[in-house]
Amino acid sequence: MIKDSALVVVDMLYDFIDGSLACRNAENAVKNTRSFIEGAAEGNDGDANEITGGFPILFVRDHHPADHCSFKEYGGIWPDHCVAGTRGGEIHDDLKQFVVEDLVFDKGCDKGQEQYSGFDGRNEAGQSLGEILELLDARDVYVCGIATEYCVRNTCEDLQKAGFKVHLLTDCIGYVDPDGHRKALAELKKEGTELL
């Protein structure tokens, strides 16, 4: 694993895996992400999930109130999803052992605002994803998650704008639509994201 790197896991939550907004390839994305993390942990004396470890893992989580503006019932385009406190809003069990609460960033918490990018999220201390990556001295950021066309893409683009070198793990992402997925990958590559 490259020194000064981190992994950002975007929205690997049950509603995007087997729930109200289940995405294609989501189960495989979770399985492959776990394999990737375990491989990274082996290279870092097994401490990949520690803040002080050589490869910190940061989780981005949609964390909506029940009356969020993105829900169809309230004028949005999506079915209800990832409501705070529900199973649908929980990180997949296969990844929970790698979760460090200080490195979980909730987005979409304001009922009147849609937020796709992990950069909009905040941890319990109110710090942003970008702030923590800077504190961790991460320059190379590996990204996986759900869904390519929306939250994954927006997170990758904001990471790039902030000056990070972005590596997208293409076998560790779920997506809404195959054509949209391929288009988003092509555009991300053109913008400078490395597709792995």
Image: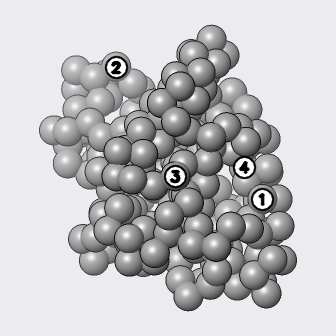
> Is 42 displayed left or right of 84 in the figure?
right
Which residue shows up at 61% across the image and 48% down it?
167
Query: How far from the left and from the top, in percent, is residue 141?
Result: 55, 57
Of tags 1 and 2, which is closer to the observer?
1
Which residue shows up at 68% across the image and 77% down it?
48
Of tags 4 and 3, which is closer to the observer?
3
Residue extending farthest to the top is 179
Q: Which residue is mark 4?
A: 30
Residue 187 lies, with reference to residue 128, above or below; the image says above
Distance of mark 3 from mark 1, alpha carbons?
18 Å
What amino acid type should be assigned to the residue bearing mark 2? Answer: Ile
Q: Which residue is mark 2?
A: 77
Image quarter of residue 160: top left
Label 1 with label 2: CB-CB less than 8 Å:
no
What amino acid type should be assigned to the residue bearing mark 3? Answer: Lys
Distance of mark 4 from mark 2, alpha carbons?
25 Å
Q: Which residue is mark 3?
A: 165
> Is 6 displayed left or right of 69 in the figure?
right
Which residue shows up at 73% across the image and 42% down it?
196
Element on which disc 1 rests? helix
Q: Which residue is mark 1?
A: 36
Q: Residues within 10 Å of mark 4 (few under 14, many from 20)?
A: many
The number of numbered badges drawn on the structure is 4
Q: Earlier in the sequence, mark 4 or mark 3?
A: 4
Q: Earlier in the sequence, mark 1 or mark 4?
A: 4
What amino acid type should be assigned to the residue bearing mark 4? Answer: Val
Q: Earlier in the sequence, mark 3 or mark 1?
A: 1
Of tags 2 and 3, which is closer to the observer?
3
Distance of mark 1 from mark 4, alpha carbons?
10 Å
